[in-house]
Amino acid sequence: MQCRSLRLTTCPLQLECLHHGVEFPPYDAKGWKEGNLQTGEDAAPVNSIVSADLAVLAPFVEAFVDKLDLPIAEMNKMLLDQKNTGDTWRNVTCRWVTANRAIWQKWIPDESECFPGFGLYDHVLQGFTDSRVNATNKVVCQACPPGMFSQKLEDNKGVTYVCVACGKGTSQSSGASLACAPCKTGEYQDELQSTECKRCDFGTYQDQTGQEACKACPASTRTLGFGSVAEADCGCPEKYIDIDRSGAFECVKCSEGMKCPALSQLDDLENGNSTNGEQFTPKIMQGYYSTITSPTEVFLCTSATNCPGGPPGTCAGGLVDIPCSQCAEGMTWTGSLCEDCAGWRQALWALAVLGIFAFLVMAYYLTTSKVTAKATVLFATTASFAMLVMAMQNLGLIGMMTVEWPISLQGLFSICQFLLLDIDSYGFSCIAGQSEPVRYLLSALIFPLGVAWMALCYALSKLFPKKHHWEGPKVCSTMGAFLQLGFSTMSATALAPMMCYRHPNGLRSILKYPGVICGSAEHDAMLAIAWVLLLVFVFGFVALCITAVLMVPRWSATRQDHLVAAVRFLVFRFRLDSWWFGVPLLVRGPLINLPVVLATDFPPIQIVCIAMILTTMMVMQMLAWPWKVPLLNATDCIISFCVVLLVTTSTLYLNEIDETMYGFASAVSTVMLSSIGGAIGIMFLMTGSALFYRSAMGGKKELKFFNLGSVPQSDDLAEKVKEMVGELEAMELAELSKKLNALAVFDISKLTTCITLLATEVAPPAQDAYSFKFNKRIASSSFDPALKRKQQTLRQSHSKEETKVGEADNALVELLGLTIQRNSDWTVFFGTRLCKHSQIITQYQHRYCNCNAVLW
């Protein structure tokens, strides 16, 4: 049987109920649905909601429930009151509460009797208080907020709790806490009532708990980050290195060329590794060098590939010395590594020296070719070769700029610098040794020895028969050609000891000889050699060339042909009216080198100055058009233009650039070098054509390609000139002057150039010859006696054929019995008649009759 309910029987007098259990049949859902309630009810679950931490969340409620005590007698009173009055339970309960205040007053806890986690709170002042005695305001309990903890307090009212602020060195992040937590290592708190501790800042650490402040790192050091927990976390900051080996700290700033992460130490730099890991290991950067004995004294290398960086004393390819500048004794640098000096290297150098002396002797005999206004096969060959050498020398000089060129360009510049006597990469140290001053002295002696050799050969030739004697002017011209060909090299060699660049450690080295420190005894010795070479051979040669350029037109006009022949080397490659271009071409190399000397540590200045020099030279070349072969002029312009663009492109390499910009700069440089290579290929083509196809230049049928157009035949041109002379002779002087006055200034300039050309090369006048030369020009006959012609006047211009006709005329006159005497009126009379009637003379009427008083 299941107990469905309890039936309460109320006794009217005693309000006592006898409880009897009534059992019903099991629950019948269908019956209940139809209204039959004679079966038991459906089971109803009884749920209790209990809070496990009610004492913490609501201690006041928990205390109230704990004190609640309602006797059964009082409960019966309320039940009886409800039965008798029939009121609602709310009214009945209210009457009981009102009548029994003493009973339920005991249930209500004291509002100032706080529980753990709570504290006294002044409800009026809106703040926590630490006393409830004599309080005028309402004091209640409230959970302690974060940053405070609940502390027990005993007073005359009993035990309660107050909220106390967390002290320094502690914190409390949650409310209703009974204590504050001390700060951990690496943390501190210097304020009261803190909800959390602060982390130690950079440069401080804390190895204890509950501290009000962090400990400072030793002087000049700092920690890697926040919250350091030990003194071992202190170290030098980034870009500084600890050089103290005793355990203390001495941080010094790392110089240029050193990579110093935080916590860098000198021992780690020397060992190449750090206990903190690779990212904290200091090292020497690529392109720089330092010695093992002084690892923080950094030197700048002239080639980044020679100095790979890393630990101090690291060099590539077996290089040694400061800063990776040369090989060990008995070895030579091949461009990528040091190799042992083999016997064949010394043999090759001996043959090279002998070859230079032999070439100078051959050069003397090559100067026997005559100089003409028109280019010859030999000229095409020599001019193309000279232009090729000058182009490569200019590229070599540009490669000496202190710019970080790409590796591909550095290789090309290294090849070109061989022509600048940068011969250390070709085993020169195998015969000169490793002493850089000695190698420099031997390089500088090449030019004086070459001149001395030519002078010796000239003197020795006097010991042979006269036909083998060397001519003084030709010897001078050969010497000049030798110095001219190597002038860029000679000037670069003379200026080399003056190019000092600065190292990060404050010292300076010679750019070409970085192992020589500027200001040292070795440098002083090299400077003495350089100044002799510069003053005597460089400046002296330039002064002689300038003097020759100024004087050679006068020498040519006054027939001082031996002086003209002595400076043949300076003018023979150019048009005879642009003979002066040899001097600008000569000084171009030293001018390119000068900015590198004066601004070695300032690449932007070098770029601007060199670009200005090259642009000026290109403009001069375009205005003068000096080469005899037009194609050579165009080729020279192309090379100059490409070199100028190559120099300006170098500005992209001054600063670090991303891969895209680096690719663009490399592409532009490649295009410029390709154009220069194409121009050089044209020179080789022209030389080959001149050798295998003699009509390419200097012949009757010259190639249009080399002349950049067609040239009229000389016969046709001569006929036109003769006709024009006849027309000019027929014109009155006043009329001719009027027509000339109407010409533009550019036309007048062309006319004066034409008159100068005719007076110099075609029909040189005998009297007052200089007045016919409006422009300065050298006569080609000055270089070769076979080309010399007697000077003529307008009265002495008969050809051999005209002389024969004149003799026939005289014979005819004699047959007529007429004696013609020149400079008489009869001569004019009979001459005029003969010109009109004689059939023999009629064909020369333009010569004898039209000239009238000129010829008769």
Image: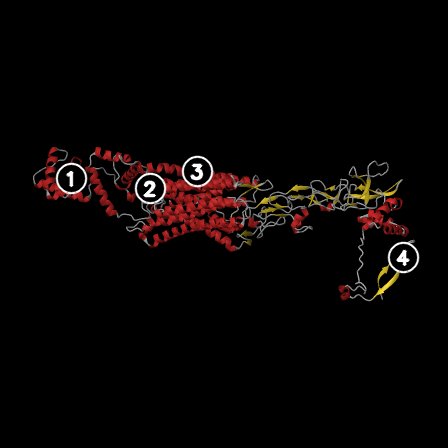
Q: CA distance from mark 1 to mark 2?
A: 36 Å
Marks 4 and 1: which is nearer the front?
4
Q: CA distance from mark 2 to mark 4?
A: 151 Å
Query: CB under 8 Å between callouts 3 and 1?
Result: no
**Res 754 quadrant in image:** top left
Dot 3 crowding, Cα within 10 Å, few <14, some 14–19, many 20+: few
Q: Amino acid at mark 2?
A: Leu
Residue 601 placed where, x, y %?
54, 40
Q: Amino acid at mark 4?
A: Cys
Q: Earlier in the sequence, mark 2 or mark 4?
A: 4
Q: Earlier in the sequence, mark 4 or mark 1?
A: 4
The residue at which mark 1 appears reads as 848
Query: CB under 8 Å between callouts 1 and 2?
Result: no
- Residue at left offset 48%, top offset 45%: 649
Dot 1 crowding, Cα within 10 Å, few <14, some 14–19, many 20+: many
**Res 524 quadrant in image:** top right
Label 3's element?
Answer: helix
Residue 438 placed where, x, y %?
53, 45
Q: Nearer the viewer, residue 172 or 348?
A: 172
Looking at the image, the residue that sits furthest to the right is 14
Dot 4 crowding, Cα within 10 Å, few <14, some 14–19, many 20+: few
Q: Nearer the viewer, residue 695 or 198?
A: 198
Q: CA distance from mark 2 to mark 3?
A: 25 Å
Q: Which mark is residue 576?
A: 2
Dot 2 crowding, Cα within 10 Å, few <14, some 14–19, many 20+: many
Label 4's element?
Answer: loop
Instruction: Answer with left or right where residue 280 lies relative to residue 659.
Output: right
Q: CA distance from mark 4 to mark 3?
A: 146 Å
The residue at which mark 4 appears reads as 17
Q: CA distance from mark 4 to mark 1?
A: 180 Å
Q: CA distance from mark 3 to mark 1?
A: 58 Å
Instruction: Answer with left or right where residue 435 lies relative to residue 38.
Output: left
